[in-house]
């Protein structure tokens, strides 16, 4: 299997941990796992997932895709990281939760 070949194209996972590209229905790869890891790290830091306030799957999809914010990719606006954690840790978690990972 090629490193650049998408690995999957089905929707699987617990909604709060699902990466944006999976909700978009496009082929995805290991970067989706990095997003899920970022959600886990956020939850360890804050005791809740980034969008725990969203109560419906439709609302969650809109928030994850930033559709309710005009497509803004700014995590600081949608789910700010607590400043009591180091700048470095917040940077790692923010990078994991990027909407368009590189």
Image (cartoon, rainbow, N blue to C red):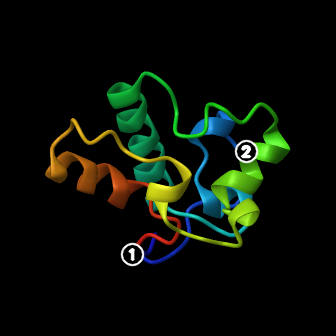
- Front in this rendered view, residue 38 or 75: 75
Residue at point 44% right, 69% down? 101
Quadrant assignment, res 26: bottom right
Residue at point 44% right, 56% down? 76
Where is residue 72 shown, x and y percent of the image?
59, 71
- Front in this rendered view, residue 36 or 80: 80
Total number of numbered discs in the rendering: 2
52, above or below 87, in the image = above
Say which residue label 1 marks: 102
Where is residue 83 shown, x and y percent of the image?
26, 42
Tell me the quadrant of the picture where the C terminus can be found.
bottom left
Residue at point 21% right, 38% down? 85
* Disc number lying in front (1 or 2): 2
Where is residue 35 shown, x and y percent of the image?
46, 51
Residue at point 40% right, 52% down? 34
- Front in this rendered view, residue 34 or 45: 45
Q: At numbered mark 1, what does the secondary structure look like: helix, strand or loop?
A: loop
């Amino acid at each position: 299997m090629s490193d650049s070949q998408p690995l999957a194209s089905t929707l699987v996972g617990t909604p709060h941990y699902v990466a944006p590209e999976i909700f978009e229905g496009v082929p995805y790869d290991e970067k989706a796992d990095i997003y899920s890891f970022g959600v886990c790290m956020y939850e360890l830091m804050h005791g809740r997932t980034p969008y725990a306030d969203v109560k419906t799957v439709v609302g969650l999809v809109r928030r994850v895709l930033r559709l309710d914010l005009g497509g803004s990719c700014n995590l600081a606006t949608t789910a700010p990281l607590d400043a009591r954690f180091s700048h470095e840790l917040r940077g790692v978690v923010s990078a994991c939760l990027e909407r368009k990972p590189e």
